[in-house]
Amino acid sequence: MSGQVTNRMVDSVDKAALELVGIVHGEGSAPDVEKLVRGMTWHELVGLAISCAAMVDPDRPMSELLAWMDRPLRPVRGAA
């Protein structure tokens, strides 16, 4: 993905991000994630991370955002 980013590229990465969320929160597995990201360029993977981050509600507390996880996380020192 060198040069100018097109709407088609963004749409493709956004679609992959929605699929990734479905895999993570659904019945997906690590091989499903591997299949989704296999062949993606570094730029596409960065775009995927950004797209997933953009789906997070910034007005929600971290404890609520991570409540779906199986184990509690320790706070990161210096985190807001």
Image (cartoon, helix red, strand yellow):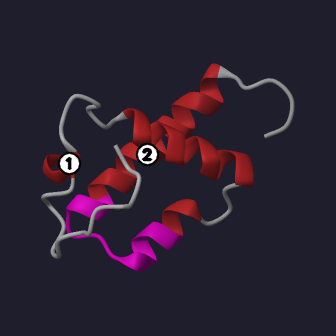
The residue to which callout 1 is attached is 65
Circle nearer the viewer, 2 or 1: 1
Place residue 60 in its image quadrant: top left
Residue situated furthest front in the rendering: 78
- Dominant SS in magenta: helix
Residue 59 placement, left or right of 12: left
Q: Is residue 10 above or below residue 31?
A: above
Tell me where residue 42 appears, x and y as whole percent: 72, 54
Q: Earlier in the sequence, mark 2 or mark 1?
A: 2
Residue at horizontal 22%, vertical 60%?
A: 25
**Quarter occupied by the C terminus:** top left
Give the residue at x 58% y 30%: 10
Q: Position of residue 8 (x, y in %)?
A: 62, 26
Tell me: 40 left or right of 63: right
Q: Quadrant of residue 30?
A: bottom left
The amino acid type of the residue labelled 2 equals: Ala
The magenta stretch is 23-34
Label 2 to label 1, Cα distance in Å?
17 Å
Q: Which residue is mark 2?
A: 17
